[in-house]
Image: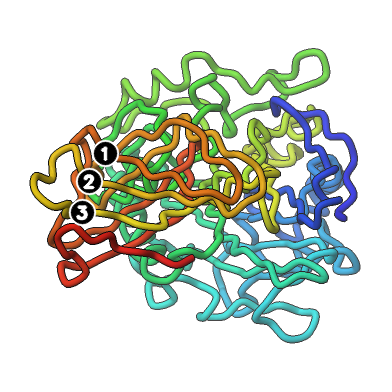
Amino acid sequence: MVRRKLLLTAAAGFFLWASSLFGQQEVRVASYNIKFLSTGVTQQGDRLAKLKQVIDLLDAQVIGLQEIDSRDALRLVFPTSQWHLIIDDDSPEKQDLAIVVKKVLSVKGFSGNNPDADDEHFLFPAAGSDDFFPKRRDVLAVEIGFPNSEESFFVMVHHAKSRLEGRATTDLRREGAAKELVKALEQRFDEKNFILLGDFNDNPDDKSLNILETGDPNALAGQEETDGPFLMNLMEPLCAAGHVSHGRNSANIENGTVNTIDVLSRDTNNQLRGTNLNTGDILFDQILIPVRMAPNYVQNSAGVFNNAVAVKGNAQTRASDHLPVFAEFVFGAEPNGGGLAAVRISALLPNPAGEDNSREVVALRNDGSGPVDLAGWKLRDKAGNEYLLQGTIAGGSESRITMTSFSMPLNNGGDEVTLLDAQGASRHKVTYSAANVVEGQEILFSQ
């Protein structure tokens, strides 16, 4: 089990480690833009000491980092006796991406104790000078494993084009990067566990993030708080509550902690969209996961680090102009403690004898030992049509549901049907073709 210290943060709750008793693996994942971290940090007053204290209090096992000059700079903050340091040693850029992993966990795909990221560890290695990923700020992706377990997950760190040249002027570059990311994730990480994090230089309402959340390259900018359907942005509720992660300084310290709330931030960002005007303090740093990974996320654990040490000092001696953001996850069989994952689609009847309307059938099977309440669960077809479920399925039994509503007709020409739980996580997905459809006969699906 990964041991943890109590962390005083803005999170709504702290992690309960009892789940490890059931063979599960727990991990805190964070994102931190350290603002031009180089070996010159030793000449910047007490900045290095503050950074070390931030990392100690953050107490994360995996951290995606932005604006790192070199491995030597990383070593000053993250001792190699405790951390795996993953960075591209051949990059000449001063704002490299990096991932650091506590050695209680393992890093897959590397040999030796000096993980040097190469082209295969980046999603877009040929895009070094591309406008979407400026100055080698590609997306670094690393697979992380647990001791005594085959389970693993990917962490991907992104640093989008900044707004420095003007927000409206640079919008297309961040939006273009988001579109490329969606394509890469769909093609290479379908059904894999991954956590996408970093400094997106946009907040959750902006078009680039809405593209990532929906998977739709034509998604519009605008205020919304809906998960998915492609990715969940764990920072979205924090944005709605007014939290910011960029721009805070010592003037924002109140009673020993950083006030991370700017009640005007969200409205200001929305009102100034389409202009090059500065939007002020904002939630740039974010963590996203596939909607199907909702059960792995510890509810209400996402937060903005608010210990005062993170912003004390002036522009040179302050740890960074960003605050870290973090979230907690549980991996292993039956995440979030239950037999929910045991519910699956066992059969469909797309073409009943006679009229289809209000006579099509879906059968759900609960292979777990306990009952599952289907309140809030639903079925979704490939076109996005949905059918709401209700009732309870006893353990070890099957429930046959006649779809009296025609909100999601089962296409006789073939379709894809996904079972979603009350948190919007995908529990099971089945596909069938026109050749499988015979009038009056059910299509059976094995586990």
Rendered view: 428 above or below 236 = below
Residue underneath mark 2: 360
Residue underneath mark 3: 350
The residue positioned 62% from the left and 38% from the top of the image is: 322
Tell me if mark 1 has few (under 14), some (14-19) or many (20+) residues whose alpha carbon lies within 10 angstroms of its own.
Answer: many
> How many tags in the picture?
3
Q: Earlier in the sequence, mark 2 or mark 3?
A: 3
Q: CA gap, disc 3 to disc 1?
A: 10 Å
Q: Secondary structure at mark 1?
A: loop
Q: CA gap, disc 1 to disc 2?
A: 6 Å
- Which quadrant would the N terminus be assigned to in this image? bottom right
Q: Secondary structure at mark 2?
A: loop
Of residues 384 and 235, the one drawn nearer to the viewer in this rendering: 384
Of residues 109 and 252, the one drawn nearer to the viewer in this rendering: 109
Asked whether residue 218 appears in the rendered view, the answer is yes
Tell me if mark 2 has few (under 14), some (14-19) or many (20+) residues whose alpha carbon lies within 10 angstroms of its own.
Answer: many
The residue positioned 22% from the left and 46% from the top of the image is: 360
Q: Which mark is residue 403?
A: 1
Q: Secondary structure at mark 3?
A: loop
Left or right of 277 in this view: 247: right
Amino acid, disc 1: Met
Mark 1 and mark 2 residues within 8 Å of each other at the beta carbon: yes
